[in-house]
Image (cartoon, rainbow, N blue to C red):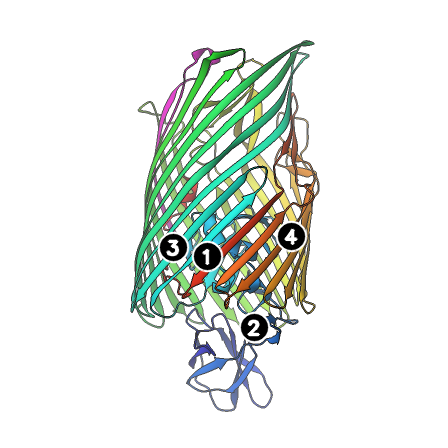
Amino acid sequence: MKGTLINQKEQPVEFANVVLYSLPDSVMITGAVSDINGNFSLNTDRTDNTYLEISFIGYETQTVPAKREQTIVMKVEASELGEVIVSGSRKIFKLDNGSILASVKNTVLETLSNANEVIAQLPFLSGKDGNFTVFGKGTPIIYINNRLVQDNKELEQLSPSDIKNVRVITSPGAAYDATVKAVIKITTEKPVGDGLSGMLYVRGEQASVFSGGEYANLNYRKGAWDVFGTAFYNHHNYKTDFDATQRMFLLGNERQQVYKTNEEGGYNSLNSVIGLNFNPNNNNSAGIRYSNNNITWRGDITNDIEYTAQDVSEKIQQNSESHSPRNTHSINGYYVGEFSEKLSINLNTDIVSGNEKDNMDSYFAETPNEILKTRGERDYTLYAIKGILSYKLGKGMLDMGAEYSNTRVLQSYNINNEDLGIDNTNDKALQNRGELFTSYQTQFGQMGLNAGVRYENIVLDYYESGIKNDEQSKRYNKFFPNISLSFATDNFQTVVGYERKVRYPSYRQLRSNIQYSSPFIYESGNPLLQPQIENQFSAMFAWQNLQGMMGYSINENEMQSIPQQFKDQGIILLWDENVKRSRNANIGLSYTPTFGLWRPQFEVGAMWQWLKLDNVDNSYNKPIGSAKWFNTFSLPQKWTLRVDASGRTSGHGGVTFLKPTWGIDLKVTKRFMEDKISVNLTANDILKTNTNKWEMDYGKIIMLYDKNIDSRSVILTVSYRFNSTRDKYKGQQASEEINRL
């Protein structure tokens, strides 16, 4: 038995629940979920004395007689108040196949200003402006229609009215790189119509200094062909100050440096994209996409430093100017095809090339002609390919795939003062990485199973000044299994699971050079770093408007930033080391009811870590608590008001003791001309209570930090859309190695 679900605009309804019941006792026979094209298939031929029940957030539940094949029209479930669609008590979030699914279309989330605002409203997520953290998991990777978002500024230009739903995967399976701990997948409305469409967008922000950005997106569609392009120019400025203190206890003597730093800087960036799609039918799609990201950072820093040793003090002033251009070119190509109702394929390939430079000139006020020059440069190239075969096996879906990537990274560092004890370096890393994976997902009535395994083989050859260093070269052969079990009823869903994850050192962490930061702080890579292995156990539940999650992880070789003394001098060297074993845990609750025009969200959470270093008596085990209270008011005449408050307590994150912080944001959005124009006014941190304060106590070395992060600002954005046809690009990233670069 099969069919198709569409709405009253003849658009497909995906991810709807389709259940077959018997008459007259209404006993469930089997069920399914509609796919991205609205199609569903039930493994039965029985049509006599049966009926179908179809349900999905935002639509009325439909009950129809069972037929071997039919098209079912779903009606939007909403009541109008003025010009606002009110969601009533409809549940926006639910647990679906082990992930959090947020329905955006025809809900209050659709009235927000951009995709950033939508993501910030999701349970167990924190952050803003593209910088998000999943509770207990860390930074997620983000996809839009299965295409990896390389620049999170793209989220600022995506309108919620174009978004169908957002899925948060807190336990990514074998199909994802073993380094990925959380995934956000945004699915937009299926594009319709030919012709030219686009969006224009401007943004202005006033903090201590002014910043702004302009964006344009155009798409031309003719039949099966799409040609699209975007350009985004951003000019960001900042001004900040902070106080820092570092103490070293050496042979019974204390050395102390007190910094008072003022910094001004910013960046100018231009991101451009051009691409081509070919979609002859629903079973085949191909395309190619080129993007260029060009950004130049700049900064002017003044350090007033008071240095004390053996009760003798000295004051100096250091001035620094930095200039850091970065340029990246990338090409992505893809093909998605369905060979039959059971077999499909997804192919992606990536080519990436880039160059980065970090240049700094610094001098002391007492000797302005003695300029210390440091020059760092990094060139990299990547070639990658990924393929996935999907096959409907029994009542489930079997995925089998392979990935391969070849990476080359050249890193150099030069300094013009040999007396500082810092060597010039010239390193090269060549890596070949191959991966195989398989996973199977199936449903047994109300129970679900998702299991998989991933194999990764990595060969990394490391060269110093053209000579291979066998000790620093790496060979990895690792397996990463995952399994989860889920249970779901109409009002309650739960999932428990286990997965093995890894965090590989970045190429920057593996560099051999020592980098000058200030007269008393140096930074260094560690070529001997080992990958961090995490054995993660997790559980989630959803009941009506309440969601909960908990996790526990046993870690091997956890990477931590550790301070140490540099060459018996009064200088701190910061680098990463492996901690043999550590553990952490988290628990969180989120409640999101709706009361007419008001949709509040209450969330609390706590995170613990059990971390002990071999050569330090201190423990780093104080938990961190967090809370947020978000409020969205859907007002008449297409006005939306938001009042968001969030904060966290003090506690340990690694070897750093974080001080408490909290803040309140206000946001107002107004839509005009049938939602073609959207105006958003935001006031961030209106009470100026967000802070960045921390301490690091490493026995004989103590560091204190207090930074004014210039978080209070006013932002005005205006966007205009015409002919809301989006490009049909379905390409994905072929390798997570891009993120490591």
Circle 2: residue type: Gly
Query: Where does label 3 land, which residue?
Result: 732
Name the residue type under label 4: Leu
Q: Secondary structure at mark 2?
A: loop
- Mark 4 vs mark 2, foreground winner is 4
Q: Which residues are magenta?
A: 411-436
Please identify, in this view, whether the residue under mark 2 or under mark 3 is nearer the observer. 2
For residue 729, above or below residue 734: below
Nearer to me, 561 or 38: 38
Label 3 CA crowd tier, 10 Å (few <14, some 14–19, many 20+)? many
Q: Is residue 103 above or below residue 228?
A: below
User: Quarter holding the C terminus?
Assistant: top left
Q: Secondary structure at mark 4?
A: strand
Q: Is residue 643 left or right of residue 73?
A: right
Q: What's the residue at 52%, 71% (across, down)?
A: 444
Disc 1 target residue: 452
Locate the N terminus by quadrant.
Answer: bottom left
Relative vertical location of residue 365 with respect to residue 410 in this rendering, above or below: above
Q: Which residue is found at the position 66% from the left and 71% from the top?
A: 89
Cα distance, mark 2 to mark 3? 29 Å
Tell me the mark number nearer the camera, choosing from 1 and 3: 3
Whichever of labels 4 and 3 marks the residue nearer the N terminus, that label is 4
Q: Residues within 10 Å of mark 4 (few under 14, many from 20)?
A: some
Give the residue number, with chain letter if any, for mark 4. 666
* Label 3: which secondary element: loop
Q: Nearer the N terminus, badge 1 or badge 2?
A: 2
